[in-house]
Structures are given as C-alpha cells and as structure tokens.
Image: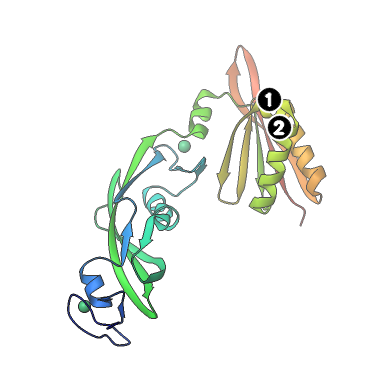
C-alpha cells in the first residue's frame, strides 16, 4: 500500500509522518489529532468557600482560578479523545481567554504522539461554574453539626477504606455522619453527635495504631436556651 497523504500527496518523513493515509500536518490543519468529548462542562462551585464538586465529593480550591486549574487537570483531562494514529496525549498548560468567572473560556495546550512524532495542539473548552452552597457551608449556616473529626496525614486510600469499613459496621456512626469532605491534607467527618465522632476516632486509632487523637471545644452559640460547644477531634500520625 502506498504511504502517501490523501490530502496533500506527501509520502511523509520523520517530522511529518503519514499514518492511515494522512500526514501529521494535514491532521493538525483538519483538527483531527485530538477532540473533546464535550466542548463545555458544568461544575458545581461553592460561592462561599470555593469548593467544587468532583464525582461524589467536594474538593477545596483557592477560588475561581484554583477551581479552573483543578478542573482542567482532573476533569478536562479525561475528556480528551485521541484521533487516528495518536497516543500519549496530555495537557501541558492552559490559558484563560476570558477572566475566571461563572463562564470561563480556556485554551488548553496539548501534547501527544502521532506515530513516533511528538506534536503540540490546542483545544478550547468552556467551563461553567454553577454557583451553589456546598454541604459544609450549609452545615456551618444551619449550625447543626456537633462534632468534626479532622483526619490528617494518612494515606487517602488507607483512610478511605477504614472509614468505609467502620460505616458498614456501625449503624450509629452511619446514622450520625452528616458529611465527609476531603480537604487539602486529609478528610473532615461531620457528625450530629459527639458520641459517634469519638467512636470513629477511637476505632480509626485502634485499627491503624500510632496515631494521636486530641479533642478541643469551640463555642457554637446558644440553641434551645442551652450553651453548646462544638467538639473538634484531631486524628494524626504520631511523629
Ligand atoms: Zn498531508
Ligand atoms: Zn462551601
């Protein structure tokens, strides 16, 4: 079979290989190297604290720009589809064509291989941040939670497994857990009751060992005529 480009007729060379009857330059010109499953995406964004919803959980960001950057590197990355003859595609950078806001146009820089030859390309994606209030901010406003277990410095896959095991084992912990929120260096578990929070902290410490569990209280104002204090339990590795 003749190896020449059906569009420009070249037989190709190292810089411009012909694969499946089309050369790299023609693929680039015809925008056939990389495509996006979706040209725009919508992500829930907490207008109070800047957290965004990724899959089933909320992730903290530093605000609009942090959210956009996280979305590009974690969500848009999964939307890239390699064209014929293309492999190893990745996002190498991006720039905002509009200011980071509720609707942001982003140009992403893509690198990939066409056969053995490395190429660079660009795609445009529109990110819509859907302004909502995340569960943590709703909780803070409603002042419903009584205790927070703040787990830090433990391998995420290990701690996630232990938490799921404990939730499956114990009705009370499961019932009293309001929300689990991933933060930069760990995970926060919000509970309706002190008891459930203490129980899971104790179980995690017993199971993993070598952890320091400490408690502090913080005033949470009056409710039903009673002064209430919120319990914060810190769980971290002994150093
Ligand atoms: Zn060509
Ligand atoms: Zn929030």
Seen as rendered, the residue at the extreme left is: 8
> Percent from the top left, x then y, of residue 143?
55, 24
Name the residue that disc number 2 marks: 197
Q: Which residue is rendered at x = 77% and y = 47% of the image?
A: 212
Name the residue that disc number 1 marks: 193
Contact (Cβ within 8 Å) of mark 2 with mark 1: yes
Seen as rendered, the residue at the extreme bottom is: 13
Q: Which residue is rendered at x = 40% and y = 47% of the image?
A: 63
Tag count in the figure?
Answer: 2
Residue 74's place in the image compared with 118, above or below, is: above
> Percent from the top left, x then y, of residue 76?
39, 54
Residue 177's place in the image compared with 3, above or below, is: above
Seen as rendered, the residue at the extreme top is: 225
> Percent from the top left, x then y, of residue 203?
78, 39
Residue 174's place in the image compared with 180, above or below, is: above
- Quadrant of the rendered image containing residue 113: bottom left
């Amino acid at each position: 079979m003749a190896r020449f480009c059906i569009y420009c007729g070249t037989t190709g060379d190292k810089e411009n290989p012909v694969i499946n009857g089309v050369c790299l330059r023609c693929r680039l010109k015809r925008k056939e190297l990389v495509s996006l499953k979706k040209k725009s995406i919508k992500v829930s964004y907490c207008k109070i604290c800047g957290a965004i919803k990724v899959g089933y959980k909320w992730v903290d960001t530093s605000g609009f720009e942090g959210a956009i950057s996280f979305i590009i590197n974690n969500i848009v990355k999964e939307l890239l589809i390699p064209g014929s003859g293309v492999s190893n595609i990745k996002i190498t950078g991006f720039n905002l064509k509009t200011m980071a806001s509720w609707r942001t146009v982003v140009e992403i820089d893509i690198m990939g291989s066409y056969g053995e030859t490395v190429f660079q390309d660009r795609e445009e994606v529109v990110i819509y941040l859907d302004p909502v209030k995340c569960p943590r901010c709703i909780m803070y406003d409603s002042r419903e939670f009584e205790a927070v277990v703040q787990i830090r410095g433990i391998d995420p896959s290990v701690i996630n497994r232990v938490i799921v095991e404990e939730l499956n084992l114990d009705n009370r912990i499961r019932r009293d857990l309001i929300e689990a929120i991933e933060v930069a260096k760990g995970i926060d578990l919000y509970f309706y009751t002190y008891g459930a929070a203490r129980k899971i902290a104790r179980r995690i410490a017993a199971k993993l060992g070598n952890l320091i569990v400490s408690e502090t209280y913080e005033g949470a104002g009056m409710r039903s005529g009673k002064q209430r204090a919120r319990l914060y339990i810190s769980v971290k590795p002994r150093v």
